[in-house]
Image: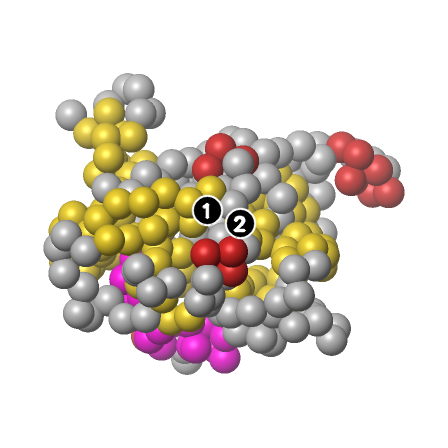
Amino acid sequence: MMDVALASSKACSSISYTFTPFSRSSSVLACSGSNPDQRRRTVIFDIELPKTSSDESNVEDNAKIEGTGSGFVWDKLGHIVTNYHVIAKLATDQSGLQRCKVSLVDAMGTRFTKDGKIVGLDPDNDLAVLKIETEGRELKPVALGTSSDLRVGQSCFAIGNPYGYENTLTIGVVSGLGREIPSPNGKSIREAIQTDADINSGNSGGPLLDSYGHTIGVNTATFTRKGTGMSSGVNFAIPIDTVVRTVPYLIVYGTAYRDRF
């Protein structure tokens, strides 16, 4: 038997969100471009949920890693796309003291860290948008492709931060189209892309690319061997056409189109 596992884990990474009474999860942003070096450039988030402490000034010292995930730069304004399940603890924390530290690389190749915030959530499609202030820095967004003309057998490439290893690239093919996978709130995500490109814990939210470096999906889940947590090689991504329809509403309204009022 197989279990569907969302591709996030308890491992170290470099993007950070901070809650006050808990521990931390992370996500990696990957920017694609016209050459391999640009495609492998990544941005990393760690969601930090510090241990309970009466001294708020020691929050950084008390923080511990809770999980890891990935994401990618959507536009030059500092919007970042990732999976909802990657930042779910941040989204549902009630302390009011959470903050997100995002470590990324700008278009010039300079690594920097900024505070980020959640601007939109769509648990139905397992998508979320974060925002950082760029303050004069130029970001390089991913090049968007389309998932409507994908063909089984074509090459694809997954970028992310599996098990805390930054800038990891895995290669495979599109194994199937039109799959249905569960979302974090128990609903179904339709038209998912199946691939044999390795997607492991920490890859969640990273981009799935075609051979031109265009983003065709968001790496989301893998089937694992029941009771072992080991990947079966059957992995899934949210199609980019769904992302393109959803993200603008998350940026403007903070929620999906169907829930905007």
SS at mark 1 in the image = strand
Is 243 a magenta residue?
Answer: yes
Q: Amino acid at mark 1?
A: Gly
Q: Is residue 7 above or below residue 64?
A: below
Mark 2 / mark 1, whichever is N-terminal: 2
Q: CA distance from mark 2 to mark 1?
A: 6 Å
In depth, the one of 219 and 84 nearer the eye is 219
Q: Which mark is residue 160?
A: 1
Image coords of residue 35 (percent x, y): 46, 62
Q: Residues within 10 Å of mark 1 (few under 14, many from 20)?
A: many
Residue stretch rendered in magenta on the structure:
238-257
Q: Amino acid at mark 2?
A: Val
Q: Quadrant of the N terminus?
A: top left
Residue at 70 percent of width and 71 percent of height = 137
Residue at 33 percent of width and 75 percent of height = 245
In depth, the one of 69 and 166 nearer the eye is 166
Left or right of residue 125: residue 154: left
Image coords of residue 177 (percent x, y): 15, 56
Q: Quadrant of the C terminus?
A: bottom left
Q: How many marks?
A: 2
Residue at 53 percent of width and 36 percent of height = 165
Residue at 35 percent of width and 55 percent of height = 208
Left or right of residue 16: residue 154: left
Cβ–Cβ under 8 Å for marks 2 and 1? yes
The image quarter in which residue 110 lies: bottom right
Q: Which mark is residue 28?
A: 2
Q: Is residue 69 above or below residue 31?
A: above
The image quarter in which residue 107 lies: bottom right
